[in-house]
């Protein structure tokens, strides 16, 4: 070591150059000294870790890890809420907008609620609503297909109404020959006149596709006038009662609860009255109504007489409205001014619903892509993208959520692709979905709603609380879930 040190001391610091080769030797500091600086970062890091760890208990460490996991999951949820084309556009980007609806759904086994899905011909036959209803009732309880017209002019996958005798029937949509001289149309924009006696035979369907619609237990009828009602179903023959007497100048609801679930019931009406709708529901959970109006653009509600409309919403605990409109206006909107006028009319409808139901939450569902012939080629209607953007802005200004069906299905040109798909997802009119396409679109909408519901439960730690409660109070395996309706039985 001494020899090496002497050599290092005497060797030139700049080295010795022999021809093109530079010969160097380590300095004396490198030979004899210790590179303490290299050790310092390791020592400091080790000391810092040793100083920190004892301050955290195992519980605190677990909490820190859970917080990191929560932040990661929250980031995943927010990524969907901000970027996905199937997301809901919430008013003021408030992801908690639908929280009151989700809270009510979680409590629906104690306090039943209604969800009403209004729309145009895309909803006919219960195609889109049927999927949503089945998903909702499977998760939150409930059965039956909900609100039905007193005179059924179009077939429905989940229920049939047969009326005897033939009644005078008016609809505030479609051909003007079906319009009444008055504006007493009720929540379905329909009314049937009973002069002395009428029978409504209601039969539930559903099969394996909509099993929660195969039966019902609660029967109701919405009317105005004077009369009385009875229901026959299996061994039951019951009178229907109403919380309002005949002096109430507005829509009244008569109802009764059967002794068991049935698939068929006969309602007998005696008196002089206007009938606005029939309801077949469960005794708990969610009722989901399909209200299809062919040719409607969603601007008729402000013209219906309030006393046949407002009492229904006020008595039925309606917590969510889905308004699916815009498609029928597309062929007639030729300018920005036309679109602006349409937006003002829609704002008036939303304002009306908010006045009738102060705690209501609304999702406005925009139109799908629609195609027309442009230079002998099927292309998206020129005004459609602008209309969709205007509808989203209208919903934002009105303080309601918006679901962009146009972009969810693929945006410009997507209708042509849906028509050409194998199997086909849209019809040859380049406007309406096939049953398969309707189901696909409904599943996309439900997928978005379900994710927001999961995010609601995640933010409020509800799943963790339920798991903890279940661990503290284990239930026998044979216990029936409180969200499950009693086992169906059929009558008639």
Image (tube, rainbow, N blue to C red):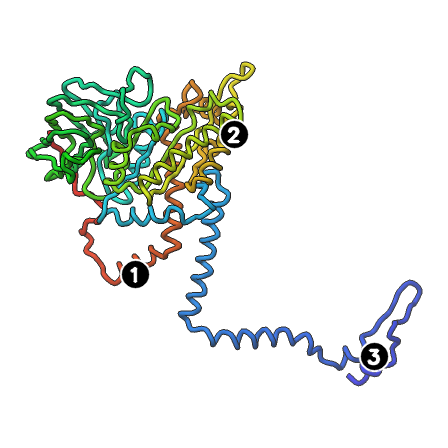
Q: Position of residue 181 (x, y in %)?
A: 27, 20
In contact (CB < 8 Å): disc 2 and disc 1: no
- The residue to which callout 1 is attached is 468
Give residue 150's quadrant in the image.
top left
Quadrant, the C terminus: top left
Task: Please tell me which of labels 1 and 3 falls first in the chain.
Answer: 3
| Mark closer to the observer (2, 3) | 2
Viewer-side residue, 418 vs 114:
114
Q: Residues within 10 Å of mark 3 (few under 14, many from 20)?
A: many
* Secondary structure category for the residue under label 1: helix
Q: Residues within 10 Å of mark 1 (few under 14, many from 20)?
A: few
Q: Residue at x 32, y 33 (%)?
A: 129
Q: Position of residue 301 (x, y in %)?
A: 34, 30
| Mark closer to the observer (1, 3) | 1
Q: Is residue 193 above or below residue 360?
A: above
Q: CA distance from mark 2 to mark 1?
A: 48 Å
- The residue to which callout 2 is attached is 385
Q: Residue at x 52, y 29 (%)?
A: 385
| Mark closer to the observer (2, 1) | 2
Q: Is residue 441 above or below residue 32?
A: above
In contact (CB < 8 Å): disc 2 and disc 3: no
Q: Which mark is residue 8?
A: 3
Q: Position of residue 332 (x, y in %)?
A: 47, 21
Viewer-side residue, 93 vs 27:
93
Task: Please tell me which of labels 2 and 1 falls first in the chain.
Answer: 2
* Secondary structure category for the residue under label 2: helix
């Amino acid at each position: 070591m001494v020899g090496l040190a002497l050599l290092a001391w005497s060797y030139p610091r700049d080295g010795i150059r022999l021809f093109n080769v530079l010969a160097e030797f380590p300095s004396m500091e490198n030979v004899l000294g210790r590179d303490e600086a290299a050790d310092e970062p390791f020592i400091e890091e080790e000391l810092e870790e040793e100083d920190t760890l004892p301050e955290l208990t195992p519980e605190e460490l677990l909490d820190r890890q859970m917080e990191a996991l929560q932040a990661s999951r929250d980031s995943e949820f927010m990524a969907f809420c901000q970027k996905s084309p199937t997301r809901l556009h919430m008013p003021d980007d408030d992801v908690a907008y639908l929280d009151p609806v989700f809270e009510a759904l979680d409590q629906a086994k104690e306090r039943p609620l209604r969800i009403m899905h209004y729309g145009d011909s895309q909803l006919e036959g219960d195609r889109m609503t049927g999927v949503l209803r089945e998903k909702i009732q499977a998760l939150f309880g409930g059965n039956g297909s909900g609100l039905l017209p007193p005179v059924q002019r179009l077939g429905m996958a989940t229920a049939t109404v047969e009326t005897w005798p033939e009644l005078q029937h008016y609809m505030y949509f479609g051909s003007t020959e079906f319009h009444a001289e008055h504006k007493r149309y009720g929540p379905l924009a329909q009314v049937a006149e009973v002069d002395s006696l009428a029978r409504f035979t209601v039969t539930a369907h559903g099969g394996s596709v909509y099993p929660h619609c195969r039966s019902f237990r609660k029967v109701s009828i919405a009317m105005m006038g004077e009369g009385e009602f009875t229901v026959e179903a299996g061994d039951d023959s019951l009178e229907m009662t109403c919380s309002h007497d005949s002096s109430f100048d507005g829509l009244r609801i008569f109802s009764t609860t059967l002794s068991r679930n049935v698939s068929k019931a006969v309602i007998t009406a005696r008196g002089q009255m206007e009938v606005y709708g029939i309801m077949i529901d469960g005794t708990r959970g969610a009722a989901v109504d399909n209200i299809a109006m062919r040719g409607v653009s969603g601007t008729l509600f402000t013209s219906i007489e309030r006393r046949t409309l407002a009492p229904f919403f006020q008595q039925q605990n309606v917590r969510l409205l889905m308004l699916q409109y815009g498609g029928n206006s597309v062929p007639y909107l030729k300018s920005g001014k036309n679109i602006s006028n349409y937006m003002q009319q829609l704002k008036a409808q939303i304002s009306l619903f908010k006045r009738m139901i102060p705690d209501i939450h609304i999702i406005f569902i925009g139109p799908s892509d629609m195609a027309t012939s442009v230079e002998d080629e099927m292309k998206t209607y020129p005004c459609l993208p602008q209309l969709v953007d205007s509808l989203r802005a209208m919903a934002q200004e009105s303080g309601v959520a918006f679901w962009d069906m146009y972009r969810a299905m693929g945006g410009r040109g997507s209708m042509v692709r849906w028509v050409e798909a194998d199997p086909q997802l849209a019809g040859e009119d380049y406007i309406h979905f096939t049953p398969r396409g309707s189901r696909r679109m409904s599943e996309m909408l439900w997928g978005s709603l379900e994710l927001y519901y999961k995010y609601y439960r995640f933010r409020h730690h509800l799943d963790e609380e339920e798991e903890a409660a279940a661990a503290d109070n284990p239930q026998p395996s044979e216990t029936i879930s409180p969200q499950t309706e009693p086992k169906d039985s059929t009558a008639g």
